[in-house]
Amino acid sequence: MSNKKEIPILIGALLVTLGIVGAGGWFLFNRMNPAAVTPGPATTVPMPRELQANASAGERVLVPTMDNETKLFASKAIAEGKNAEALAQLTQHLEKSPNDPEAWIYFNNLRALDHNPLQIAVVAPVGSSLNIAQEILRGAAQAQEEINQKGGIDGRFLHITIVNDANDGTLAQQFAGALIKQNQILGVVGHNASSATLSAAPTYEAGGLVLVNATSDANGITNVGDHIFRVIPQINTSAQTLVQQVGKEVDRVAVCYDSKAPDGVSFYQEFTTGLLASGGQLAPTVCDLSEANFNSQAKMAEIVASGAQGLLILPHIDRLDRAFALGDANRGRLKLYGNSPLSTIKTLEQGRGMVGLMVAIPWSSKSEANRPFAEAARKFWGGDVSWRTAATYDAVYTVANALAIAPSRPGLQKALKEPEFVSSTINGEVSFLPNGDRAGQATLVKIKPSPSHVTGYDFFPVNP
């Protein structure tokens, strides 16, 4: 994904002068082909002090890693305006930790400064769900690297500010207000949890700043206004796909959902409506995962006694433990189903308790149709990536392709709203329905044993 034959003379001189990069560094610089760096554009309105610790374009480290020291040195250098030193430090760090998406973003931000950057923000829940935040940042980092290696957007490189909202609705809303006031930020990719997105979306809409969501599937998000878009299919698509599969396997289904998770509530509504319309039966139980004294063993006994043959579990992304407890209490008696929050490595780490769980998600790395991006991502990151990585990659590319049409806030919104707008990448095409949702289908995956996966289990497509 880079030109290994053309290395700017300036970088060669820089390497010699600094005298810190050996053969491994030479390879990495050759791969990345970085340009000289100069100070970037000033922030129009400074980020409020209480938010600054959770936002960074490189001047602070938000994501801890095993080898954090060099990245910390790089961030300190960026904060002090020593960009050449920071570039060398990040190069050294990426030689040891090539799968660190935060470092890739900061590295590409430095490269962008000399190329009249187009700036966006990417919001990830670093403070509450670190694994999921990393999945999101991988998609952003890979898209940024590819875009900048191709010469940017009409010669202008993409620059990303990372924002940590910790999946917190109040913090998400505060960041939305702050980002609106930073005129150099042309668009935002985020947020993760539906609750955070629903809290922030009205602020983006009122401020005229485009939000392209990649991981929240609750109903109502794109109904907020004309500046809110989403690159995953509507939740009724996922729910109906699961309804069809459930109808083939069981006659009666119980549902446990988190009443404080908007995406879980939306999925519950869409699923039950579709199930009853198709002739299926709901078990006469009430199961709210948000209850203060939730008892998984007692609830599972109640569900089994109701005559249910299957159980649909719809947890909040930051409260998966009760879903796992239900899996343990089930002991293989009922078929298990779920929505996208359960598509995590934490679910796989539960082992036998979640084997057979079937989940509706927007994308699978093991589907034949997704092979081009899956292989590129595997090469870049050294392993399979999740649907969140693919969706964020799509979102960042969608923003970039729209900015290529009109590189401004109003231009971005107008380009995305055009009925004929299509964003094409190796991961397929993104086009929007009139309401701002992506046109597309859901994928069903099922947990099965996998000796090649670090957990011993993995998600496999039901219909590859």
Image: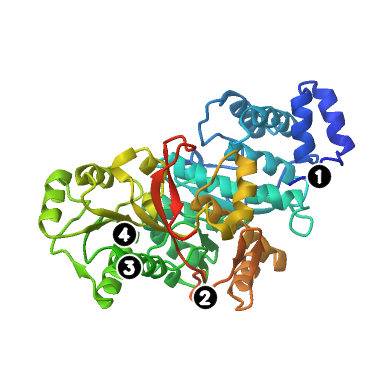
Task: Estimate how packed mark 2 is, as few (under 14), some (14 to 19) or many (20 or more) residues with alpha carbons within 10 Å.
Answer: some
Q: Is mark 3 on a helix, strand or loop?
A: helix
Determine whether the residue tagged by mark 1 lies in a helix, strand or loop. loop
User: Which amino acid does the dot numbered 2 rest on?
Assistant: Leu
- Residue 138's label in the rendered image is none
Q: Nearer the viewer, residue 184 or 189?
A: 189
In the displayed structure image, the side of residue 97 where residue 113 appears, left or right? right
Q: How far apart are marks 1 and 4 (CA)?
A: 45 Å
Label placed on residue 243: 3
Category of crowding for the residue at label 1, using alpha-carbon neighbours closer than 10 angstroms: few (below 14), some (14–19), many (at least 20): few
The vertical placement of 144 against 268, above or below, is: above
User: Which percent across, then down, holds residue 280?
Assistant: 23, 71
Q: Which amino acid does label 1 sit on?
A: Asn
Please report whichever mark, 1 or 3, sits nearer to the chain's N-terminal start. 1
Residue beneath label 1, please?
3
Residue beneath label 2, please? 433
